[in-house]
Image: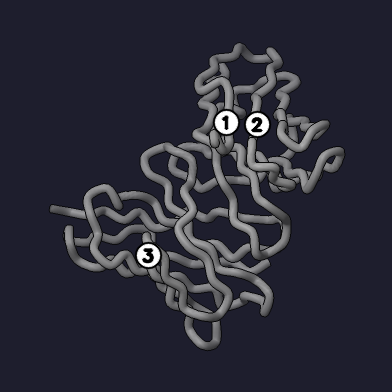
Amino acid sequence: NAGVTQTPKFQVLKTGQSMTLQCAQDMNHEYMSWYRQDPGMGLRLIHYSVGAGITDQGEVPNGYNVSRSTTEDFPLRLLSAAPSQTSVYFCASSGGWGTYYGYTFGSGTRLTVV
Amino acid sequence: DAKTTQPTSMDCAEGRAANLPCNHSTISGNEYVYWYRQIHSQGPQYIIHGLKNNETNEMASLIITEDRKSSTLILPHATLRDTAVYYCIVKTNNDMRFGAGTRLTVKP
């Protein structure tokens, strides 16, 4: 049981480049989300999805796109990378949505934009 | 949204109980209190959660006051590996918002 798998673990981008951060879970979880964590700070919610075909914005959605075509996968796309997007990105999943369900997190993708 | 207040940092001697407080005075009746921790720069790890009753699992105990305005996470016998940032979160539907947390340092 792999849980939540994020790829790549590390990435360096040049300003203006695009890329997709991958997130996959094998727990048949309905809910998935993306967070970013800047140095010395807590996690901030970027986007989330309560099921295949449904996505919504979190606290800091600008500059990021998401889609949810399958239950297992929830990729995060950076269309035109900026240095302000240098951060550690975490994907999380949950068995349901609502106040009761806790999250399982991936190990993170460390992104540097130069 | 209910928000939480935690001390910025705490120290604890190895082998002693670590008691981490959290205030959540605006919590609503159906909102759960969650505790996560983050070791180094790893992904946050779930510890425990509760609604209004005290909870215990293999990692920790959670004590919630009767008015639900505050809670305490207890690590009964802290080890050096418990050094981490501990987050107290009140979850509102789809929103799990992380504050700055408490940096717990367990000292030999």
State the image quarter where residue B102 is shown: bottom left
Q: Residue at x 55, y 87 (%)?
A: B67
State the image quarter where residue A64 is shown: top right
Q: Nearer the viewer, residue B1 or A3?
A: A3
Determine the secondary structure under disc 1: strand
Q: Return the residue at label 1.
A: A5
Q: Position of residue A105 (x, y in %)?
A: 55, 42
Q: Mark 2 belongs to which subunit? A: A
Q: Residue furthest left?
A: B108
As drawn, the label of residue A24 is 2
- Tell me which numbered mark, 1 or 2, is placed earlier along the sequence: 1
Q: Position of residue B10 (x, y in %)?
A: 29, 61
Determine the secondary structure under disc 2: strand
Is there CB contact under 8 Å for labels 1 and 2? yes
Query: Which image quadrant: the C terminus of chain A?
Result: top right
- Mark 2 Cα-neighbour bin, 10 Å: few <14, some 14–19, many ≥20: many
Q: CA distance from mark 1 to mark 2?
A: 5 Å
Figure check: A40 above or below A75: below
With B44 as the anchor, is A14 left or right in this view? right
Q: Position of residue A21 (x, y in %)?
A: 65, 24
Q: Mark 3 belongs to which subunit? A: B
